[in-house]
Image (spheres, rainbow, N blue to C red):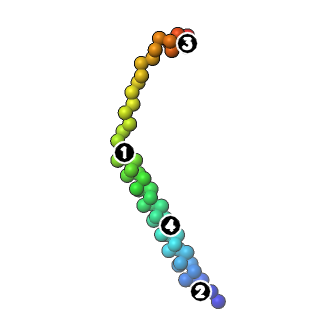
Amino acid sequence: MPDYKEMYLKMFRAAEEAINILIAAQRDCEEMYISDPEPVVRVLPSSKADKDSHE
């Protein structure tokens, strides 16, 4: 007869390990996101031709 308690404990430990791996990956990605420098955003001047075509 299978040892159901050991089977349960093995699955529980594996699930806990998987969750911890996902949490660590999420934290690493969040750290990468907040550590990345802000992008430089510029507003380009519109040309006269662009203004005329929208009217």
Give the mark, 3 or 2, whose residue is nearer the N terminus: 2
Q: Residue at x 49, y 65 (%)?
A: 19
Residue at mark 4 to residue at mark 1: CA–CA distance: 27 Å
Q: Which residue is mark 2?
A: 3
Give the mark, 3 or 4, whose residue is nearer the N terminus: 4
Q: Which residue is mark 3?
A: 53
Of the pair 9 and 14, the residue shown nearer to us: 14
Q: 10 Å neighbourhood of mark 4: few (<14), some, or many (≥20)?
A: few
Q: Residue at x 50, y 67 (%)?
A: 18
Amino acid type, label 2: Asp
Residue at mark 3 to residue at mark 2: CA–CA distance: 77 Å
Give the mark, 3 or 1, whose residue is nearer the N terminus: 1
Residue at mark 3 to residue at mark 4: CA–CA distance: 57 Å
Residue at mark 4 to residue at mark 2: CA–CA distance: 23 Å
Q: Nearer the viewer, mark 3 or mark 4?
A: 3
Q: Which residue is mark 1?
A: 36
Q: Quadrant of the N terminus?
A: bottom right
Q: Is residue 18 above or below residue 53?
A: below
Residue 27 coordinates in the image, percent (x, y) = 41, 56
Q: Quadrant of the C terminus?
A: top right
22 relative position to 2: left or right: left
Q: Residue at x 62, y 86 (%)?
A: 2
Residue 22 coordinates in the image, percent (x, y) = 48, 61
Give the mark, 2 or 1, whose residue is nearer the N terminus: 2
On residue 18, the disc is 4
Q: Nearer the viewer, mark 3 or mark 2?
A: 3
Amino acid type, label 1: Asp
Q: Secondary structure at mark 3?
A: helix
Residue 51 coordinates in the image, percent (x, y) = 50, 12
Amino acid type, label 4: Ala
